[in-house]
């Protein structure tokens, strides 16, 4: 079920040799982005990248001059720069599916008064591209751009389930690290859960990402293989069998409506 190394490396797949400095630049920016609001010192970055401090420092200074990295007043703490925002917003602004999906998740959130998400599979992670929060319980942070393991999210599991039995690789890490005490970390149990999701047409996570929150995820099948999904997050305290059926039925209608409007993409890769 693991993603092969060459499938995760675009350069290896295409036969083009990777450029080490470019790869390290990407690794550094992704590392800083993953830390969110926690700036890093040069030593931390050097150790995380497994690279000499001198070369990491030279790279940081170059990126800082171009706005991709920012430093504090002392010049010793580093975080992601404003130019990264331009790249991220451009991606969202030009995505053909987000423009179609956004009105539907807005309507669905208004109908259910629950939090609705739209995400995309990126190797073994799900990346949140849009969120419409419930009016009942607002979260203190935006989920747009957040990255979570696919195997522990309803959206991610819905997309992984699409790959079962098709001959495609299912991108699941060798070691399943729990996010909560409820996260499925046994591989056989995960496979069984994905098979069940494939059979019923949607996936669930039962407090596997956040304690007290359950989620229903539906793959959007306008690409082959499916790479996008929608989900609905619900406090477990509010979840009854009747409410679960209401949510599943509403999400199924929304999924079908989105797929009818979305252009079909047969060239998607994961």
Image (cartoon, helix red, strand yellow):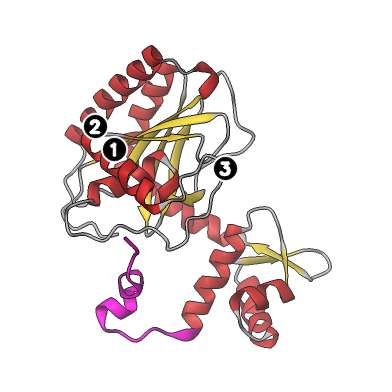
Residue tagged 2: 200
Q: Is residue 147 left or right of residue 56?
A: left
Relative horizontal placement of residue 86, taking residue 100 as reference (left or right) = right
The CA distance from mark 2 to mark 1 is 5 Å
Label 3, label 2: how far apart the Cα atoms are:
25 Å
Q: How many marks?
A: 3
Find out whether the residues at labels 3 and 2 contact each other: C-beta distance under 8 Å.
no
> Cβ–Cβ below 8 Å for labels 2 and 1?
yes
Question: Of callouts 3 and 2, which one flags the residue occurring earlier in the amino acid sequence?
Answer: 3
Range drawn in magenta = 1-20
- Residue drawn 24% across and 46% down? 162
Q: Does residue 97 lie above or below 14 as drawn?
A: above
Q: Which mark is residue 180?
A: 3
Give the quadrant of residue 6. Answer: bottom left
**Which of the labelled discs sits on residue 197, or is there none?**
1
Question: Circle 1 — which element?
Answer: helix
For marks 3 and 1 on the same chain, the one whose residue lies earlier in the sequence: 3
């Amino acid at each position: 079920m693991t993603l092969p190394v060459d499938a995760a490396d675009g350069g290896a797949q295409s036969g083009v040799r990777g450029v080490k400095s470019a790869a390290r630049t990407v690794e550094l920016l992704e590392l800083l982005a993953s830390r969110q609001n926690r700036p890093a010192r040069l030593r931390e970055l050097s150790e995380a990248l497994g690279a000499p401090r001198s070369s990491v420092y030279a790279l940081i200074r170059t990126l800082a001059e171009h706005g991709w990295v920012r430093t504090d007043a002392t010049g010793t703490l580093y975080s992601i720069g404003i130019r990264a925002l331009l790249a991220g917003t451009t991606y969202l602004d030009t995505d053909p599916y987000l423009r179609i999906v956004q009105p539907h998740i807005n309507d669905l959130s208004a109908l259910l008064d629950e939090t609705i998400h739209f995400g995309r599979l990126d190797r073994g992670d799900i990346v949140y591209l849009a969120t419409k929060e419930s009016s009942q319980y607002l979260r203190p942070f935006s989920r747009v751009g957040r990255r979570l393991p696919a195997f522990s999210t309803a959206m991610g599991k819905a997309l992984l389930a699409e790959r079962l039995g098709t001959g495609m690789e299912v991108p699941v890490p060798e070691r399943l690290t729990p996010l909560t005490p409820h996260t499925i970390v046994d591989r056989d149990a995960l496979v069984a859960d994905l098979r069940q999701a494939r059979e019923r047409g949607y996936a669930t996570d039962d407090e596997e990402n956040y304690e007290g929150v359950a989620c229903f995820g539906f793959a959007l099948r306008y690409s082959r293989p499916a790479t996008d999904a929608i989900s609905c997050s619900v406090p477990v305290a509010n979840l009854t069998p009747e409410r679960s059926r209401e949510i599943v039925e509403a999400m199924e209608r929304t999924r079908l409506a989105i797929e009818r409007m979305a252009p079909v993409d047969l060239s998607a890769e994961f």
